[in-house]
Image (cartoon, grey):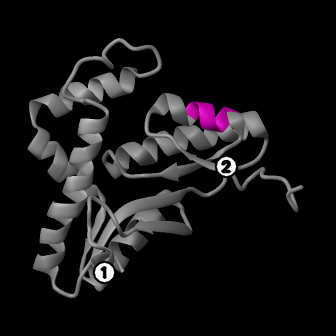
Amino acid sequence: EPFKSFRGRTYAAAVSPESARIMAELGVGLLVIPQKPLEHVEREFAEYKALYQGVNGEPAPKPIFATWTIVDENEKRAEEMAREYIGGYWKSVLAHYEFHKDHLKGQKGYEYYGKFAETLQKDEDGATQFFMDLQIYGTPEQCVEKIIRIANRLGSDRFTGIFSMAGMPHALAK
């Protein structure tokens, strides 16, 4: 048996507002993976926290946030690697979920993703840059600054960096 309950220790990603409501009702903490502007995340997290408190009778756990992360002593090289690897990861997501098609439009439970697909179809390169800029990349100092800024805005005390992606050589990720 587990040494204690998983209550307050279980987290799940919730990109859509509908998913955040489900997580609050289940008593699950949020794993925030930036895919939209931070002000949208903050607004949805405030709604989640209020619902969580109402349903569970206690404050919601602090969120964990996770980002694709590229760190290099050279700022220009970090940006080039972010474009190649974070951008490459994002393009694999677009291909996997076939966001270039309309199959999510009108799909019950996937309304948010249907709207998202519409936006992506208009400017895939712009969407890739947008996603890249939501993640962490730059010099060590720039990365730490961005992590702290995001953590403070979300009220988070936990961060998970994803350092290997999109065919990146292991030595480079390390």
Label 2 and label 1: CA atoms lie apart by: 39 Å
| The furthest residue to the bottom | 73
Rendered image: mark on residue 171: 1
- Up/down of 32 relative to 102, above or below: below
Q: Position of residue 69 (x, y in %)?
A: 33, 68
Residue at horizontal 67 percent and vertical 39 percent from the top:
52
Where residue 89 appears, x then y in whole percent?
27, 53
Label whose residue precedes the other's in the sequence (2 or 1): 2
Asked if residue 118 lies left or right of residue 60, the reply is: left
Q: Which residue is mark 2?
A: 60
Query: Could you tell me which quadrant the C terminus lies in?
Result: bottom left
- Disc 2 secondary structure class: loop
Range covered by the magenta-colored residues: 21-25
Answer left or right for 40 relative to 70: right
For the N terminus, the image quarter is bottom right
Q: Determine whether the residue tagged by mark 1 lies in a helix, strand or loop.
A: helix
* Amino acid found under the numbered disc labelled 1: Ala
Marks 2 and 1 in Cβ contact (< 8 Å): no
Q: Is residue 140 magenta?
A: no
